[in-house]
Every structure is written in C-alpha cells, then in structure tokens.
Image (cartoon, grey):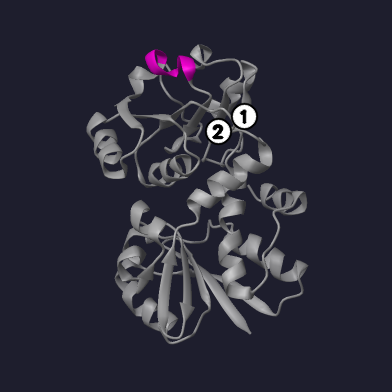
Amino acid sequence: MKRAFVIGHPVAHSRSPLIHNHWLRTYGIAGRYEPIDVAPDDLPQFFDRLRAGDFAGGNVTIPHKEMAFALADDLDPLAEVIGAVNTLVSRDGVVFGSNTDYLGFLGNLDQNAPGWDLGLEEAVVLGAGGSARAVLVALKSRNIPSIRLLNRTLQNAEDLAIDLEGPIRAGRLSDFPAVAGGAGLVVNTSSVGMHGSRFDNLDLGVLPKTALVTDIVYVPLVTPLLADAKALGLRTVDGLGMLLHQAVPGFEAWFGRRPEVTPELRALVEASL
C-alpha cells in the first residue's frame, strides 16, 4: 500500500488529509495519506525515511517549506525560482521537490473565473512573502504585461521584484489608489483577512468595474477584502480552490491517478472550515 503525508509543525489544522483521502476513496485506490507532526530539528531524519522508501511522497506546510527546499535531492525549476517546496516525491532513494502553489492559484482562477487572463494588462499583488513568490511566478507564466507588487515594507517588495525580474514594479500598500485604476486583477497573498483582519484604507472603489479580486486566505472563506469587493459589484474568487488545485499534481505522482476538483470535494472541505 502506497503511503503519503503532510508534514508541518503543527499539522492538525491541515485539510490535506481530507482532500487526499476523499480522492483515495473516490477512485478506489489502496493507499493512505496521513498528517505527521515533524519538529524542525527532526526534518533531516524524516527525509532519511523518505529516501528509504517509507512513503511515496507528501506535502509540506508551515514552517518546513524553505527547509524542505534545502533538503530535497532534486528540484523542479519553478521551485528553484520560488525558493520553497510544498510537494515531495520519493523514487529510488531520491527526493524530488516541487512547488504546486502556483498551479493551485492558476487552477482556481481558471475554474472559477474562466478567461480571467484574456486581455489582462495589469495586476496588483498585495504582500511580498513566500506566497507572493508563487503568485508572481504564476502571473508571469500567463504573460501579464504589468504587475504591481505592493507591501507595507517597501524594501521587501523591491527585493522580491528584483529577484524574480520581469514586469514587476514594487510599491507601498499606500500606493494602491494611485496604481489600481487600470488593474483588472487584485490578489491578496498576505495573511490579512485571517481572524477578521482587514487592510487599512484600501479603496477598492478605484478599480475598474470589470476587475476580479481574489484572496489566498480561505479561513474565513469570505474575507473582509472579498466582502468589500462584492459590495462594490466586483467579481471575486475565494482562496479555497487554490488549496484544492495545488493538491492535484502530488496525488497523481504518488498514486498514479490524476484527480478532479469537483463540487463534492469543495463542499466536503468547505464544511470543515
């Protein structure tokens, strides 16, 4: 029986077991997916288990994404650009690391806002942390001509823009009213929105009426940012779909079947939030 995992510290909050075990049942696959709490100091020893063949692979969540990137034997080129991994595959004693967050981001928008990137000239990305890297890589892959990266700390946004290169211009969050007038997409990649938190003085009213607003935060499902956008009649996509779609490539690699993100799966995970 093939086994897979999600590792983190803590890990009990992860919805990954719910997702993958649903797919195992749906496709009648004799496999097992389990959450494993691994302290940071124990991560190298866990990789030894992975190389020994104890698992087909697994997912990586906070705080291990950067350390797993360093410990992997081989890396997907985009994972190298992003600088973190969330998916591991073990074959013949070699651990391969990839980052499927950018695929999750694109899959979510493609499913829930088809054609979102057609004619899109400018996007605004809020936040300059690890999640922003994956989203920026995703937007670059769709050849968005202009990307504004806004962050509370300007230096962090500037460093990220330089690191990733391309059509990314850095600014402060306070620059939003000045730069968002032509934006067809706004993406929140920060933790703002969790626990009811909201951005200060972020006037979504300056956006075009056709703009799409999306948030990678999915607890709560409708963040204050999305609620404000809906109140203005703007299109919105919540962050739950990103979680579901990022899981697809790993399941296929471990269990040999490409799963589908269905309304049934979404309802199952949504009920757990």
Q: Residue 170 at x, y = what percent?
A: 30, 29
**Neighbours of disc 1 within 10 Å: few (<14), some (14-19), many (20+):** many
Closer to us: 135 or 28:
135
The stretch of residues the image draws in magenta is 177-182
Disc 1 secondary structure class: strand
Label placed on residue 24: none
- Mark 2 nearby-residue class (10 Å; few <14, some 14–19, many ≥20): many
Query: From the viewer's perspective, is 21 left or right of 124?
Result: right
Amino acid beneath label 2? Thr
Q: Secondary structure at mark 2?
A: strand
Q: Which mark is residue 236?
A: 1
- Are the two marked residues, 2 and 1, in contact with CB atoms closer than 8 angstroms? yes
Q: Is residue 123 left or right of residue 209?
A: left
At label 1, the amino acid type is Thr
Q: Which residue is mark 2?
A: 214
Q: Is residue 267 above or below residue 197?
A: below
Report x, y in % for residue 71: 32, 70
